[in-house]
Image (tube, helix red, strand yellow):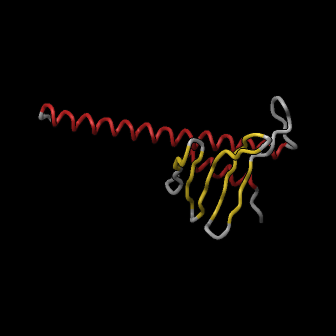
Amino acid sequence: MAVSDLSLVRHLIQATESGQEPLRWRCRGPCEFRAQLNGVRLSLAHMQSREGSRLCLCLSDGSERTRIEEPRNEALFGTRYRGEEERLLAESLQLLMELVAGRCASKKARSWDLRDSVRDSLFNRILFGKP
């Protein structure tokens, strides 16, 4: 039984929302995120083309590779896809990107907060002899 693109993306949304331990997204650039799950490398990024920017989820185990691309918007203004399945896939990929970007942003903010508290502690020990 083949698994649809939409089912896989929805599974990744659930795993990202729940903060499942084996799935940890990492920021690789301004809009590129990577993770690994059950031996499969995941890469979520914006793909540029003449038609504009679309989301692309790449899956790889080292020897094999495939990708799921955001369906092309058929409308000049607003959104229109060729069918309901394409609309749901586009919305799901967009939601996954929002969740992943949000998770990575909160991790980055926490790391800066931790860095600042360590820095303050060390400065206080040097300047005032207080731990």
Q: Residue at x 70, y 45 (%)?
A: 55
- The residue that appears at 54% across and 49% down in the rendered structure is 28
Which quarter of the figure has residue 64?
A: bottom right
User: How many tags in the picture?
Assistant: 0
Q: Residue furthest top?
A: 77
Viewed as shown, does residue 93 lie left or right of 129?
right
* Residue 104 image offset from top left, x and y in percent: 51, 42
Asked whether residue 89 appears in the rendered view, the answer is no
Q: Nearer the viewer, residue 87 or 57?
A: 57
Answer with left or right where residue 48 lies relative to residue 42: right
Q: Is 86 located above or below residue 43 in the figure?
A: above
Whole-percent x, y for residue 42 in the image: 61, 56
Name the quadrant of the N terminus.
bottom right
- Farthest residue, direction front: 50
Residue sitting at the far left: 129
Q: Is residue 97 visible?
A: yes
In the image, 6 versus 126, the foreground residue is 126
Quadrant location, the C terminus:
top left
Residue 89 as seen in the image, left or right of residue 19: right
Residue 91 lies, with reference to residue 64, above or below; the image says above
Q: Is residue 116 above or below residue 68?
A: above
**26 or 9, nearer to the observer:** 26
Q: Residue at x 75, y 45 (%)?
A: 49
> For the view shown, which residue lies furthest in the right direction?
82
* Residue depicted at x 50% and y 38%: 105
**Position of residue 96 measured from the top left corner of the image (x, y, whole percent):** 64, 44
Q: Position of residue 63 (x, y in %)?
A: 64, 70
